[in-house]
Amino acid sequence: MPGQRHARSVVPGTPPAPVPIAEAPVRRPAARSAGVRALGLAGLLVVLALVVWASLMVGSGRVAAADVLPALFHPDPTDKAQLILREVRVPRTAAGLLAGVALGLAGTVMQGVARNPLADPGILGVNAGASAAVVFALSVLGMTDPSHYIWFGFLGALVASVVVFAVGSMGRDGATPVKLALAGAATSAALLSLTTSMLLTDSRSFDQYRFWQVGSLTGRDPAVLWQALPFIVVGVLLALLLGPHLNALALGDDLARALGQRVGPARAACAVAVVLLCGAATVVAGPIAFLGLVVPHAARLCTGPDHRWVLPYSAVMAPVLLLTADIVGRVVARPGEIQAGIVTAAIGAVPFVVLVRRRKTAGL
């Protein structure tokens, strides 16, 4: 009859036909095109240029915006504002640029090669190793030439990396993120006590490098910057070339080998890049924490997991964050200032706690 629903006929002895269930469409994040990523990178470069301009202007000594370009290209030795800019602000800003680029790329490479979202030059003890070795060269061996003690920074970074990975790899589970973080924390604590003991027994070194130890851009000697520049340039170029290799390593060693990746040489190249970048950055600005941890995750939010884009984004974001922290430290405690390493540690502490508590970020 009209309006009645007819029952579906079923043959006796046969199960009813399954009723198809409509599946909800799976929403996948829209792929970011290369043009959008390039546009974002260009925007970050503009932001970096503005932050550099602000770093040259802001501080205890007054420098007008009109004095920046003449001081850089047509210096006047009798102008006090230009003298402050050339002798204080330019080395300080250059140190922030070099250390920021180095630590941002080092953190990205470490997280990619270890597939560990907690990997960071500060957390895994690399910065502490470089710092301890540099202080040993300065305090115990009496070296004052940057061309001499910069090699100790690289040696300390290398030794600390090997120790942390060896300790974190013990046991059946291998080098898990939590074990590496714990091994890095223990190694950093031991190296920090060693560094402190050396500085306390040498008042001259303590007075000279007490701000350098907490991570600072103040009082940077241009000679140190020139000595570290070649190593940072080589480390940056090597890290940027490792993007495709890090993408393959993120799939796992077995699949990377199946795709033709030489896992051993790729990991060795990553280690060389990290040692060069961390050692030089520590010599330039001291052991600055959390910068290499926060910046790679911020870069992935903009680019996705492709390391070919994460690396250049991190190379630009890190100096923006470090110089911004340095500017904030100059402003909030006038007429004194708070060192950049303290400000970056305050900024990075909250993301570190969030990353540790999130189980989904156990690997990259």
Image (cartoon, rainbow, N blue to C red):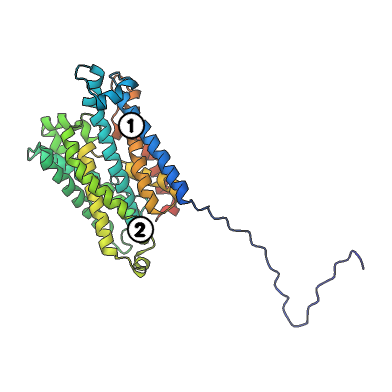
Q: Nearer the viewer, residue 257 or 341?
A: 257
Residue 13 seen anywhere in this rendered image of the structure:
yes
Q: Is residue 308 left or right of residue 25?
A: left
Give the residue at x 36% y 45%: 314
Placement of 67 over or under 238, stated as above or below: above
Give the residue at x 44% y 49%: 303
The residue that label 1 is drawn on is: 52
Residue 192 seen anywhere in this rendered image of the structure:
no
Rendered location of residue 129, percent (x, y)? 20, 46
**Dot 2 crowding, Cα within 10 Å, few <14, some 14–19, many 20+:** few
Q: In terms of secondary structure, where does tag 1 sit? A: helix
Q: Give the distance between the C-alpha atoms of the residues marked 1 and 2, in whole angstroms.
A: 31 Å
Q: Amino acid at mark 2?
A: Pro
Placement of 77 over or under 207, stated as above or below: above
Q: Is residue 28 left or right of residue 45?
A: right
Q: Which mark is residue 119?
A: none
Farthest residue, direction bottom = 13
Q: Is residue 250 left or right of residue 168?
A: right
Rendered location of residue 226, percent (x, y)? 18, 38
Q: Nearer the viewer, residue 19 or 305?
A: 305
Placement of 141 over or under 88, stated as above or below: below
- Quarter placement of the C terminus: bottom left
Give the residue at x 35% y 41%: 316
Rendered location of residue 341, percent (x, y)? 29, 35
Q: Quadrant of residue 84?
A: top left
- Quarter placement of the N terminus: bottom right
N-terminal of the pair, mark 1 or mark 2, is 1
Q: Quadrant of residue 101?
A: top left
Q: Which mark is residue 244?
A: 2
Rendered location of residue 339, percent (x, y)? 28, 30
Q: Amino acid at mark 1?
A: Val
